[in-house]
Image: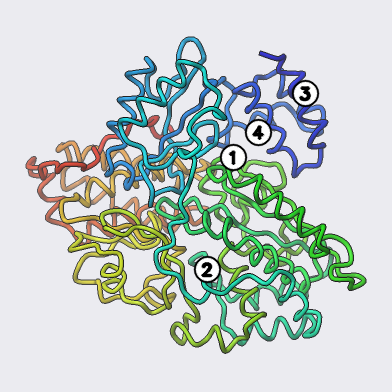
Amino acid sequence: MPDATEIARDAIARHGTAPVQLLAVLHEIQRRYHGIPRAAMEVVARAFGRSVAEVEGVIGFYSFLHERPHGEYAISFSDCPVDRFLGQDELIERLCRQLGVAPGQVRDDGRVSVETTSCTGLCDQGPALLVNGRAIPALDPGRIDTIAGLIEQRRPLEQWPGAWFRVEHGIRHPGPLLEAPEQPGKALELALELGPAGVLERIERSGLRGRGGAGYPTALKWRYCREAPGEHHVVCNADEGEPGTFKDRELLRLRTGDLVEGMTLAAFVTGAREGFLYLRAEYGFLAAELEQHIAERRSAGLLGHTILGREGFDFDLHLVTGAGAYVCGEESALLNSIEGRRGTPRNRPPYPVTAGLWGRPTVVNNVESYIAACRIVLQGAEWFTRHGTERSRGTKLLSISGDCARPGIYELPFGTPVGEVLELCDAGEPVGVQVGGPSGTFIAPPEFARRIAYEDLSTGGAFMVFGPDRDPVAIAAQFSHFFAHESCGFCTPCRVGTALQQRLMERICGGRGTVADLQELEQLAGLMRQASHCGLGHTAANPVSDTLARYPEYYQARLQGAALQPQPGRPPADSRKEVARDA
């Protein structure tokens, strides 16, 4: 293996020492050395003007970076409940048995390591894994056996069957946003005719709200940034880390042009000259295609200096790949990550529109929001407002997975009832639906008339279906493990609260729970919602609170020591991943 310091120097020479390049440098060191040893940290620290402790802190924050070397073949299985429903646990055990490695460990010869990650963004095509960052969906025992053999033969990934790495687009029900053909540069040409104020007015009339779930008016965000003094930036949040969400995976592949054009429109309105597309680590296999598309737009005069020949219209875009941190979906944490720091959420106010990247006014929207903005400029506000409700205009892309015959991506008008969504995906009679991922809302059959809308069930896109043989308590326990694992540890209410919640849920699932445990769970929920630093802590108790309110008989059965019998395919309540942070 090459010397770690040589690898570090080479990575720095390739990427440079701007703060935004720190994650890229660390990724390259790890890819080539399978870890980031202290000697490499020292080289990086000197080059970036940081202390070794700072660099070590960044590495320790992200789950995809590590000091201790992982395997030459680093395998990560999805730990999302949907993948576990499909038999992923048995596949992990099968692979580990054949390779002679324990889950979460590196084999003695350094050849392979096997672990889990919260969600690979392939819930519609699971069970799935990542091997050295490349996705392999649709796993089965036969494929697992072949993977084990290829690893033992030390065959490079380029010699593995190419069909394994094919991720299907998964679009089941396209709507106006997905059906409209891309028209490179046309929205920008219209923008030059309308002027910044005209573009802003069109977005405002459309009623477009952010598609991440919070629903902040897009035009208002762009206007506040435009009016703030100083140099401006535009950022795309493509870090859809919510388990059960995968729509951006396809938007990034199929609507790249509309995405980049939407970001360029935001730059035109705000006067920003530089933008960043922050890609979640699990989608690293899309990075090369995205870089190529960005380069092609530069060559076509749609990015860079003097866009479309307009003097002073300058905007360039850079891709930043994250390193595995759910909390970086929060916009201020994402900004810290772009700046080459730990992705800890900031205190707010100030908000990014006035003090974002490096303290400068910054627009942050997600992938779907920028694409919608592009289409609105092209097709008009009235085209957009023909769909949806008074308070929720347009359509919403849903990532539907779980116990249904037709998982995939559905574009539906806001206001669509949950029951209608279940009919479309052929879900039968589920015990419940998790709308919005673990941080969203778990609803029961009597609520299936509720609607997907900001005024009712707001969602960033996840829609997880749980069939009649699933146990809501076990599902809530898995989600409590997820939050304990993903807490950044910055604030005590979240760090301690999520760990305690996980332990209490494990007690209840193990038949050792008491009524006092249920009372403590309710008290913890209130504490985390009121006192946590950011949205992760505010929502970490949602799955437990929702299931306690809607399925008390399931909890009562556990307390009585008569837990419901596991059904085929039901995931175990206990977790294979590391113990929660020390409370």
Q: In the picture shown, does residue 76 fall above or below 235?
A: above
Q: Where is mark 4, residue-wise?
A: 27
Q: Where is mark 2, residue-wise?
A: 211
Q: Where is mark 1, residue-wise?
A: 323
Which is nearer the eye, 553 or 163?
Answer: 163
Spatial distance from mark 4 to mark 1, Cα to Cα? 8 Å
Residue at far top of view: 109
Mark carried by residue 280: none
Q: Residue at x 47, y 56 (%)?
A: 169
Spatial distance from mark 1 to mark 3, Cα to Cα? 20 Å
Which is nearer the eye, 396 or 214?
Answer: 396
Q: Residue at x 56, y 70 (%)?
A: 210
Q: Give residue 451's position: percent from left, percent from top.
A: 34, 76
Q: In the picture shown, does residue 69 fall above or below 522?
A: above
What kind of residue is marked 4? Answer: His
Q: Give residue 75's position: percent from left, percent from top.
A: 47, 29
Mark 1 and mark 2 lie on one chain; the one further toward the N terminus is: 2
What kind of residue is marked 1? Answer: Ala
Q: Secondary structure at mark 3?
A: helix
**Labels 4 and 1 touching (C-beta < 8 A):** yes
Which is nearer the eye, 108 or 526?
Answer: 108
Residue 57: image quadrant is top right
